[in-house]
């Protein structure tokens, strides 16, 4: 029977291509979304991993001042090294100094140039010695003057800059105009894992890094002929241990360049895998929606062919053969959809890349991926999705009895209730499992964005299963709700409403197919809108509570996380004397690592697991710097932190509780300038998490931690926006923001994970709405015979279209109610399982009628044209057998 089945499948495709086109497009869209998401994940992984490009490719040994962070091979050392003490060694052939300064690069028009992927834009010295220089000039020449720079290829492309053009660099303490003299690559790459590079003359970089003359953060060494890298490292390590530490400026770390490159590659690969994992989890929504849509359309397709499948049974086809026929058709459909979807995945990935680049995550420097993972995996996923979606349809087709071939009615056979109830119970049990995992995560993890994201992810998986379970139960809701809609229709339209009620209640699966697709679309849209509104409202409320300053001077550029990029610190001097300004306070920020007390001393280890790997993890936190005299004029922090002196630190109550610290206790932290001992002066609370979320110090203490700490903003009390704008008019890339505008801009870094879902959910929503449109259109089209017979007995075209509209009203009511229930339930569960005040189930009243109106418009728009065609069916055609 294999060959006849193939012939029947071919004939089905040839005769029913119009009906199959809608299903094919739904499957193609699902595969395209899967392929585009995978392509973006792979390109993001390559961009973040940064390939094997390393600035240390020609060096043999690195001598790094002070100490280095073993967990971050890209972090600069916290000390300095004297270059002249190393160049005089006989076992060293060449040596150059190195330092890094985080900068913001801007085009001549003031638009910021976003660094590649998760990286930063770093100012580093040009390496004049060809034995150590890893940079290949692709155009122009090396920088020689103080106002000249060379840039990597990604900066040139992203900023549309060429040799000879001028760009603006925002350094920690000043803003400078520089001229591009060269464009370089590293190992043929346009960027590195650390981000983008701006290369300047060595002395220019040393002064920007605020290093003494002749001192560098690290020194690159080339071993003399006949001296291996390991031998040079061991010799330097012995000398440092004996008497060279004093000459080098303190302690120093000696490492082979190969070991640093390996550490960079491992860290980049881990970061790339992490990014790809997050993107993959977000793409799971696309896979779910694709499976959901294709399953619905396949079910409708099988229902349309009930008579033909019954005729196959009447002429001798077994149920198994009928099921194989459906699966064979699904295989053909899946193959075509996979081929088209993989091709369409490339423009979809480009769209995703553009959307993420606007938010600060730019992976355009990576190339399109053509490996087997990028091509074969989505193609296989398309086959699996269509086969999985066709499983239920094949099972239902196999149950079609030959007697149904003789029926003229399209009424659905009465099915048993317990299989649906059992299936839904199993699915809901799976959803409860994920919700319980979210509760466990909340109990085990400390409060913070990481915990909230993990809890939200578990809730996402639970919600997807809940949607599936409700879709299984949807036919049970059609009868009561359809009866209610029918009664309303009877009151409004008389006999037409009664007929509509009969058609709704007679075919619950047909109505539920369209309603479940609409339910999915409403649930996706309403959930994202509810969460976004809740988070934004809470940030706005908390920001107004904390920020006493009326204005903030911030950068127009953004970091990779989406927050305003650092300013030059000299901006504050420009607004201090402006008319009406009573206080202008610089808000700086840097990251430090807690060295002492160690985690076990802080009481973080559990009994019996002392020395565990988890307890040994370093604790990194952000320290904000604000002038104590002006703190209360610009910020209203909870707990009223004391006036801080040099060497003191105030910690947030959450950090104090998490680390088991107390007032008056001494801490040792490691910042950009080495280890510093600080005394805990008190506790406070920043409910907005935007200004001083974890720790607070005075400016003098901040200079001890990091002389080049990022200037986040200048908070201004008094003055007008126009006056402040005139004061900073000569500074490129700077803007004046009001309180609400700055809070919204500053919160971008904390809402990045939420914004990342918008692109995927938006495309998944379009796919769900397309699936609903396909199901509604096919459902109306399959009743052409029924509508034609109604016309034969006297029904007008207007009455037939009214019947369709009342049935669409039942779809809207059922899909909207279930979708909004899912959305509200999701937000309530997020609030309960995360404990976050930023996820509150308190939506605006206008959201529900707006969503309902949108659902009604979408449903009526998709059913109007098929209804017109069905109402115009000639009587003779309607009476003809299928």
Image (cartoon, grey):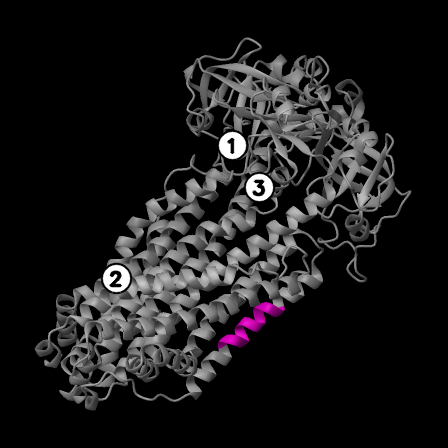
For label 2, the residue is 24
Horizontal side, residue 775 vs residue 74: left or right: left
Q: Is residue 217 magenta?
A: no
Q: Is residue 212 visible?
A: yes
For label 3, the residue is 267
Residue at point 61%, 67% (across, down)? 437
Residue 504 versus residue 374 in the image, above or below: below
Q: Nearer the viewer, residue 382 or 415?
A: 415
Disc sitting over residue 15 in the figure: none
Q: Main secondary structure of the magenta part?
A: helix
Magenta range: 427-436
Horizontal side, residue 738 vs residue 694: left or right: left
Alpha carbon distance from label 1 to label 2: 40 Å
Looking at the image, tell me whether mark 2 or mark 3 is earlier in sequence order. 2
For label 1, the residue is 115
Horizontal side, residue 274 vs residue 650: left or right: left
Residue 136 versus residue 432 in the image, above or below: above
Classify 10 Å Cα crowding around label 2: few (below 14), some (14-19), many (20 and above).
Answer: many
Asked which quadrant contains residue 866, the reply is bottom left
Asked which quadrant contains residue 406, the reply is bottom left
Horizontal side, residue 548 vs residue 22: left or right: right
Residue furthest bottom in the image = 403
Q: Quadrant of the C terminus?
A: bottom left
Q: Quadrant of the N terminus?
A: bottom left
Residue 301 versus residue 398 in the image, above or below: above
């Amino acid at each position: 029977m294999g060959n006849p089945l193939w012939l029947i499948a071919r004939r089905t495709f040839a005769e029913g291509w119009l009906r199959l086109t809608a299903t094919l497009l739904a499957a193609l869209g699902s595969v395209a979304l899967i392929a585009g998401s995978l392509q973006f994940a792979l390109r993001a992984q390559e961009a973040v991993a940064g390939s094997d490009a390393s600035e240390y490719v020609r060096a043999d040994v690195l001598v790094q001042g002070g100490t280095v962070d073993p967990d971050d091979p890209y972090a600069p050392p916290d000390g300095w090294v004297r270059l002249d003490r190393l160049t005089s060694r006989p076992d060293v052939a060449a040596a150059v100094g190195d330092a890094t300064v985080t900068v913001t690069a801007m085009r001549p028009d003031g638009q910021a140039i976003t660094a590649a992927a998760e990286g930063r834009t770093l100012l580093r010295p040009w390496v004049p010695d060809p034995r150590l220089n890893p940079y290949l000039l692709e155009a122009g020449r090396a920088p020689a003057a103080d106002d000249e720079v060379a840039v990597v290829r990604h900066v040139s492309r992203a900023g549309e800059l060429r040799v000879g053009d001028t760009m603006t660099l925002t350094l920690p303490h000043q803003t400078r105009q520089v001229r591009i003299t060269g464009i370089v690559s590293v190992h043929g790459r346009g960027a590195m894992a650390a981000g983008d590079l701006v290369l300047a003359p060595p002395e220019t970089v040393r002064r920007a890094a605020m290093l003494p003359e002749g001192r560098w953060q690290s020194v690159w060494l080339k071993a003399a002929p006949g001296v291996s890298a390991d031998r040079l490292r061991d010799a330097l390590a012995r000398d440092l241990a004996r008497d060279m530490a004093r000459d080098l400026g303190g302690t120093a770390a000696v490492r082979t360049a190969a070991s640093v490159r390996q550490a960079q590659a491992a860290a980049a690969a881990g970061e790339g895998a992490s990014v790809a994992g997050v993107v993959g989890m977000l793409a799971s929504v696309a896979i779910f929606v694709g499976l959901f849509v294709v399953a619905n359309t396949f079910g409708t397709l099988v229902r349309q062919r009930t008579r033909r499948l019954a005729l196959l049974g009447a002429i001798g086809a077994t149920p198994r053969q009928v099921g194989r026929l459906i699966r064979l058709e699904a295989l053909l459909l899946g193959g075509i959809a996979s081929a088209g979807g993989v091709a369409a995945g490339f423009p979809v990935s480009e769209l995703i890349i553009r959307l993420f680049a606007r938010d600060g995550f730019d992976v355009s420097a990576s190339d399109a991926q053509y490996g087997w993972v990028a091509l074969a995996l989505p193609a296989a996923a398309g086959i699996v999705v269509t086969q999985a979606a066709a499983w239920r349809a094949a099972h239902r087709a196999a149950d079609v009895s030959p007697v149904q071939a003789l029926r003229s009615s399209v009424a659905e056979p009465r099915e048993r209730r317990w299989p649906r109830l059992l299936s839904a119970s199993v699915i809901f049990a799976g959803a409860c499992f994920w919700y319980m995992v979210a509760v466990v995560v909340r109990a085990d993890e400390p409060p913070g964005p990481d915990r909230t994201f993990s809890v939200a992810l578990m809730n996402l998986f639970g919600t997807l299963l809940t949607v599936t379970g409700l879709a299984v139960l949807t036919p049970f809701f059609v009868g009561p709700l359809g009866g209610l809609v029918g009664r309303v229709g009877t009151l409004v339209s008389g006999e037409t409403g009664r007929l509509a009620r009969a058609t709704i209640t007679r075919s619950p699966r047909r109505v539920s197919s369209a309603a479940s697709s609409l339910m999915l679309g409403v649930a996706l849209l309403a959930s994202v809108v509810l969460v976004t509104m809740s988070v934004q409202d809470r940030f706005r409320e908390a920001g107004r509570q904390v920020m006493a300053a009326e204005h903030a001077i911030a950068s127009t550029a953004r970091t990779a996380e989406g927050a305003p990029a650092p300013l030059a610190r000299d901006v504050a001097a420009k607004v201090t004397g402006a008319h009406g300004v009573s206080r202008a306070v610089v808000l700086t920020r840097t990251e430090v690592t807690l060295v002492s007390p160690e985690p076990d001393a802080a009481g973080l280890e559990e009994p019996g697991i002392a020395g565990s790997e988890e307890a040994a993890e370093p604790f990194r936190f952000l320290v904000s710097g604000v002038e104590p005299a002006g703190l209360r004029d610009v910020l209203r922090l909870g707990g009223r932190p004391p006036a801080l002196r040099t060497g003191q630190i105030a910690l947030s109550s959450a950090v104090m509780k998490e680390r088991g610290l107390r007032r008056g206790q001494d801490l040792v932290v490691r910042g950009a300038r080495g280890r510093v001992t600080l005394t805990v002066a008190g506790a406070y609370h920043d409910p907005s998490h935007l200004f001083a979320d974890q720790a607070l110090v005075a400016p003098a203490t901040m200079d001890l931690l990091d002389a080049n700490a990022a200037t986040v903003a200048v908070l201004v009390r008094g003055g007008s926006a126009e006056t402040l704008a005139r004061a900073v008019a000569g500074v490129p890339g700077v803007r004046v923001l009001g309180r609400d505008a700055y809070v919204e801009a500053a919160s971008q870094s904390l809402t990045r994970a939420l914004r990342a879902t918008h692109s995927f959910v938006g495309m998944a929503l379009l796919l769900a709405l397309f699936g609903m449109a396909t199901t509604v259109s096919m459902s109306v089209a399959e009743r052409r015979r029924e509508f034609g017979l109604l016309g034969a007995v006297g029904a007008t075209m207007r009455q037939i279209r009214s019947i369709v509209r009342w049935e669409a009203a039942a779809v809207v009511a059922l899909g909207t109610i279930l979708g909004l229930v899912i959305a509200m339930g999701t937000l309530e569960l997020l609030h309960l399982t995360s404990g976050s005040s930023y996820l509150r189930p308190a939506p605006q009243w206008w959201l529900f009628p707006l969503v309902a109106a949108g659902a009604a418009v979408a449903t009526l728009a998709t059913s109007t044209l098929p209804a017109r065609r069905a109402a115009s069916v000639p009587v003779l055609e309607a009476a003809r057998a299928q």
